[in-house]
Each structure stands twice: as structure tokens, then as C-alpha cells.
Image: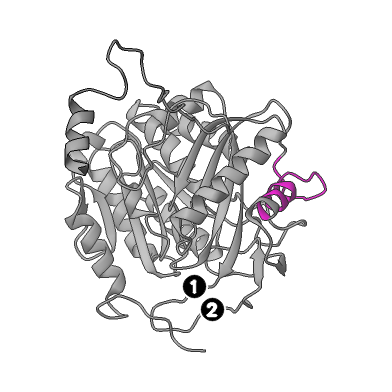
Amino acid sequence: MHRSKKLINSVDNCVDDALDGIVACNIGMQLLQGHRIVIRSDLKNIKGKVALLSGGGSGHEPAHAGYVGVGMLSGAIAGDVFTSPPTGSISAAIRTMDRAGAAGVLLIVKNYTGDRLNFGLALEEAKAEGIAVEMVIVADDCAFTTDKKAGRRGLCGTVLIHKMAGAMSEMGKPLDEIVEKLNIALSKLGTMGICLSPCSVPGSVPNFNLEEDELELGLGIHGEAGIERIKIISANEVIQKVIDHMTDPTNESHLSVQAGDHIVLVVNNLGGLSCLELNIVAKSAMKYLESKEVVIERAYVGSLMTALEMGGTSLTLMHTDSEQLKLLDSHTSAPGWPNAGKHHLTRKCKVLNVPSLETEYTDTPSESGPFVDKARSVLD
């Protein structure tokens, strides 16, 4: 198995180069000196509001630096590719927010052992210094039918949590209220992925192999093993299989979805799926959910949380209400957040009828007129 091609300058500097690139292209961001931390450039506007920090291993772009901005994250801490960021950097980000006058700091962390450990240590250090800081854990994976020791993995649903938390922070909500409302949302959130081809960390070979006629269901965003490998089937069939598994009551990690429920749908590109395929997947998901009489309030389609160049997609479903929709619809300057519509959806494709091409009645015979005469002279 050969190392995959990467368009980078060097393996050692690829994370730093990527962070430099996103900051250079977005005026609302800046780097914290000596760390792989992207923070808002308008720190003065954080004063009196809850600061929001997230992060994790690199390779999931636009997560998490792409979600730094007004109405979303105050900062994002990056580790090496698929590696949790160090506790020292997380602590530095917390202190930066506290010294900017934040009314508390909230850590939004995906449920992976390294992330929980390093963010948890930083949280304890900050509390010992008298900083008001709390942590919420995103564990939205619906793949495994029985509970694993480490719990459900944190996947693309994290981005919805970023958005709602950011909106509440801008509204001036206190830290305890934000945590309470996010935990309610987390209990009604589920994600599951499918994969057609693997990814590879820069400088390494692919971290697993799939045969040409295979796809894998339920894998993680670092290439962790899924629940089943099957032969390639149509988009409609695989999306139906994924949604059925996510909502199956016999699955201990399932998300209960019933007719009449109002949900938010995220169709996420894991990095290497073409836009054509992603739109086909979105249509399949919309069609199947509406056949089950589920009301789709919002649909976000794009690359929201990737796994380098992995060829695949994930579906996220979240139960929603009018208050949460206002949070999702609120303004953000974060470049990674999709500019989606703010109305509930139906699967029917909007089609404009072609105007009638029948010739309108005139007094001029159809076989004569300036244009007809000119055309005849040219033909003659």
C-alpha cells in the first residue's frame, strides 16, 4: 500500500500552514502566539459574554477553526492531525478568554478519550485559578447497537452545538443556562457515517482498506472501524439503511424519530465525496425522511466535519423546536457555517414551467414580415 498524495509543503508543518491560511483569508480571526489556537480578532466584543472554545485533532476542516467568529466559537485549539491538542494550549486559550473579560468559558468537546482527558485537565486547572468554566461532551454517534466502554463518539452533530451555543452567547445568556439548553439538544441528536474509500494522515499510508465493491457503515471520523461492510448499493438503499439503523429502537444508541417530528438534517461530506454525489445523498435522505412523515425544518449540506480525503458522508438528525431554529438561523461570521435557507423544506423539487412557445395572433401573416423577408433574402 502506497502513501497517498498530499498537496502540502511538509508533513511537519501542514497543520501550521493550514491555520496560517485560514487566518490570512479571514479578517475576523487571529492566531495566539506560540500555540495552534485560532481566536476571534474582536476579543473586546467577548467582554461580558460567555466565551466558547472547542477543538481537537486537525484533519476535520472546516472544524474547528472554520467555526470561529461572531455567533459561533470564540476560539479553536488544534492538535496534530487526528491527535488531541495539548492541555497547555487549551489552558492558554481559556486564560485568554478570561482576561478578555468573558463571563465564563464553555468547552465544547467531542467524545474521544484524548480530547476528554486534555480538555478535562485544562478545565480543572482553570477552575483552580478561579475561572468560571464548564464543559459539554458531544456524543452523537448512532452506529453501535450496544454501549461501548468509552461511550458514543462525537461526530458532525458537534457543529450544530457550536452554532446554538454561539447564538446564545451573543444574546448574553449565562453559562449555566447555555449548558442546560445544550444538554437538552444533545439528548436529541444523532449521527452516522458511511465510507467508500479511506483517508490517510500526511506521510502515511491509508489507515484501512476497502475493496472496490465495498462500503462501510458506521465508521468514525478518524477511520475507526464501523459496524458492517456491505457490497455497494444505490444511494437510496444505503441512506435508507443508515436512517433505519439510526432510528431502530433495538439499537441502544438510536435516536427516536416518529411521524410528525420536526428535525434538522445535516448531510456532511467526509472529505472526498463529489458535490454531485452529496446532492444525490441529500435527495435520498429528504425523500426517505418525508416518506416517514418527518418534518424537515432545515437541511445543511456540505463539508462541515471531514476526515481528510475520506470518500463518504454522514447524516445528522436533531429534533428541534422554534427556539432552537432561531439559534440556528441567527447571524454568524464564521466562514465554515453554511448559508442555508431559513424555512422548512419539502422534497419536491421546485420546477418552473416553460413559457408557451405558441405564436401569438397578429394581423401579419406568418409567412411575411421584416425578419422573414430578410431571412429569405439571405437564404436565396
Secondary element type, mark 2:
loop
Q: Image quadrant of residue 225? A: bottom right
User: Given the image, on which type of amino acid does mark 2 rest?
Assistant: Asn
Residue at left offset 43%, top offset 76%: 201
What is the x, y in percent for residue 119?
Answer: 45, 57
Marks 1 and 2 close (CB-CB < 8 Å): yes
The answer to if 252 sits in the magenta stretch is yes
Provide the secondary structure element on which disc 1 rests: loop
- Image position, residue 24 (x, y; %): 17, 57
The front one of 364 and 52 is 364
* Nearest to N terminus: mark 1 or mark 2: 1
The image quadrant where one finds the C terminus is top left
Which span is picked out in magenta?
Answer: 238-255
Disc 1 residue crowd, few under 14, some 14–19, many 20+, Cα 10 Å: many
Residue 49, position as x, y percentages in the image = 31, 32
Query: Which residue is disc 2 drawn over?
Result: 207
Residue 199 — which label? 1
